[in-house]
Amino acid sequence: MIARLLACTALSLAVALPASAATDAEVIDLAAAQVRAKATVAQMQPAEKVVITHGIMPLPGGGPKVDIPKDAIVGAGYVSGIDRLGIPALRETDASLGVSWAGGARGDWSTALPSAVAQAASWNPALIQRGGAMIGAEARAKGFNVLLAGGVNLARDPRNGRTFEYFSEDPLLSGILAGAAIRGVQSNHIISTIKHFALNGQETARKYVDVQITPGAAHESDLLAFQIGIEQGQPGSVMCPYNRVHGSQACDSDWLLNKVLKQEWGYKGFVMSDWGAVPSIQTAINGLDHQSGEQLDPGVFFGSQLSAKAAADPVWRARLDDMNTRVLTAIYAAGLDKHPAPPGGAIDWDGHAAVAEETAKQGIVLLKNEGGALPLSKTVKSIAVIGGYADGGVLSGAGSSQVMGKGGPAAKLPVAGSGIWAGFISESYHRSSPMAAMKAQAPGATMLYRQGQYIKDAAELAARSEVAVVFATQWMTEGLDVPDLSLPRGQDALIEAVAAANPNTIVVLETGGPVKMPWLGKVKGVVEAWYSGARGGEAIASVLFGQTNPSGRLPVSFPADESQLPRPRLDGSDWVEPDFGGNPKNGKDQLKADYNVEGSDLGYRWFARTGKKPLFAFGHGLSYTNFSRTKPAIKGLSASIGVKNTGPREGAEVVQLYLVQRAGEAKRRLVGFGRIELAAGASGKVAMTIDPRLLADWKDGLWTMPGGDYVLATGSDAETLDTPVTLRMKARSWKN
Ligand code: BGC
């Protein structure tokens, strides 16, 4: 029932979808595919039962040497097929933002979507589904039939090096958007993962950090994001990560894999390991179905070793059949055997770039706009463009999700590692110049550029110009967290100096997630552009000059500083060698992360609970027009909110509905949202169905809602709420 209710959550009746939005993706039916999978397993010879249970990383120079079969494609993973049974080989590539570059080993290019947090800022599931369909089409055209996408970990700490790869700090928003992305990917008859299950909240020391959290708090937060994402997206596979949970590695966690995923949620697809995350063969009994990138593990456990166990022990035999059934269920559900993906398919580069550009436009968040400084006038005489390699391109995040656009990077700075790994950890800029796009918007303006290394020189240029636009970057990567939320390389001082020299200073942020802004009071405007993808430069210029009316809303809270966070210090950096694998120095291998500090109250919920004021609240985002909202009309779990565009031009509003009090207890939870596009003066309605799990707490296998008054309010962000409405609810509890 909950799944059905959820299908309607966040529905905005009035949302205007882009013409080619992939709204009609076939729903993957894992249950139906399972019947066929069981029939195939019944025909398997014992030796055939350990073929699809494990795979290699077909990457020359990527870790320990391995023989790469001829039909493999260089990328993240390869799993042999079984011709006799018509089972196709699996060719796996990363990730959620496009077909990744694999350190350059394949020598091809792909279309980069904006970062996931940028996508999430659109609060637009239909758009995100379209993005998923786009990257899935590219994966398919290149011959891949598994996309290691669906990153949905919650942003528990904004310093997490993969913040850019994940959607948000909120379970509802993250789950709905991940589900949409997965639907899009799988509409190409390829399998998508959802990852990394679960509680994979930091990168530094990722292989050793041991997460402590009560089952209740986990179900109400990180696990809920996965649960919703799985219900909405039906991914063929779930990837378990490196971190430990309650002492076990996540890929060896009976609690996560058997109890929660398979028993409680009834998940029918397969669990694949992250690359190098399998400690032993015992993981099979604890719920792991497939060993990926096996040469990175201490042993190939899911081949002949598994065969021997199955031959000797009926428990292992049954498990092995189940493992095969699950992998085949995913293969059949997505139709991999009936719709093979031969390499060399045509790619609609322009069409795909247009999807990336639209996503960037809808994800850009206007944080500050004093005195209507933005949009810039097209007749502006002179603009000083400063910093961020804005004359060349836009920043991207690094690691296994790194995508490289056609022609390669505009600039690429090596950061860490050697050999192929250096290609995974480099600060790379997509070839989409914001400055060139700004020139196209205002051809009459004189625009001069300074990279900003010499602050005095940049400030002098700013002083001579009518407007100064500073591009400030914060690079993030998989494998490493950022030590704090400052803008690195003296950019704060650069912004201060430019703002002191020119009263019309605008800052464009290209960051992986939240950053501190000590200069905020001194600049006129701040635009959060995130990592904006293949056409980020065009999208940024379009917002700066008002061709696009910004409609992004923050999917993560921006703290004023680190002292406001549940863990003011992110542990691990003092003893872990900063590298891709998070390997320990000094032989230490235990590090506890206590998520019970905040429990399920992370992000904006933490700010509400502690009364601390963030720099910018979750949900915040300005527009070049204004909107008014009616009081929500709520009947049962259905809510409807009227919205009017009261300003001078068309724009999009994101209606956010929060629970603020439950049975006398203060709470802050997003319970529904919907995006609506309205012409100037026009009105519309946003309808949403509240997912009751957001009103409940989880304990001992049950969701429980206390009886009493439930106070809900819409708001322009999680802190700025409209007049609330009170509903009387009966006590109830239910499973799942
Ligand atoms: C990452 C995964 C990725 C895998 C394969 C790992 O390092 O954590 O997200 O899918 O590599 O490249």
Image (cartoon, grey):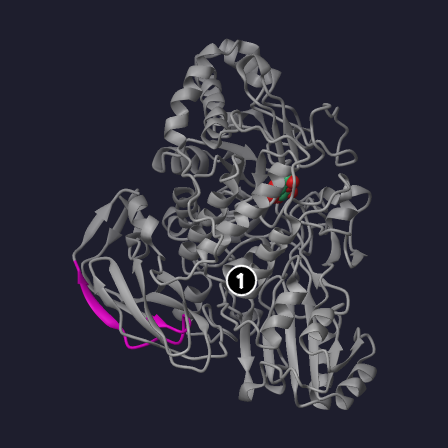
From this viewpoint, is residue 557 visible? yes
Q: Residue at x 67, y 33 (%)?
A: 343
Measured as percent of width and height from the top left, residue 174 is found at 46, 54
Q: Is residue 439 above or below residue 291?
A: below
Front residue of 677 and 175 = 677
Measured as percent of width and height from the top left, residue 412 is found at 79, 57
Q: Which residue is label 1 attached to?
A: 567
Residue 244: quadrant of the picture:
top right
* Magenta-drawn stretch contains 717: yes
Q: Quadrant of ligand 1?
A: top right
Residue 342: quadrant of the picture:
top right
Left or right relative to 256: residue 563: right
Measured as percent of width and height from the top left, residue 196 is found at 53, 44
All told, the count of numbered labels is 1
Measured as percent of width and height from the top left, residue 622 is found at 49, 76
Classify the position of the C terminus by image quarter: top left
Magenta segment boundaries in residue numbering: 714-729
Q: Residue at x 63, y 61 (%)?
A: 531
* Magenta-drawn stretch contains 595: no
| Amino acid under disc 1 | Arg
Residue 717: quadrant of the picture:
bottom left
Q: Is residue 562 above or below residue 385?
A: above
Left or right relative to 42: residue 47: right
Say which element carries label 1. loop
Q: Residue at x 65, y 66 (%)?
A: 538
Classify the position of the N terminus by image quarter: top left
From this viewpoint, is residue 248 visible? no
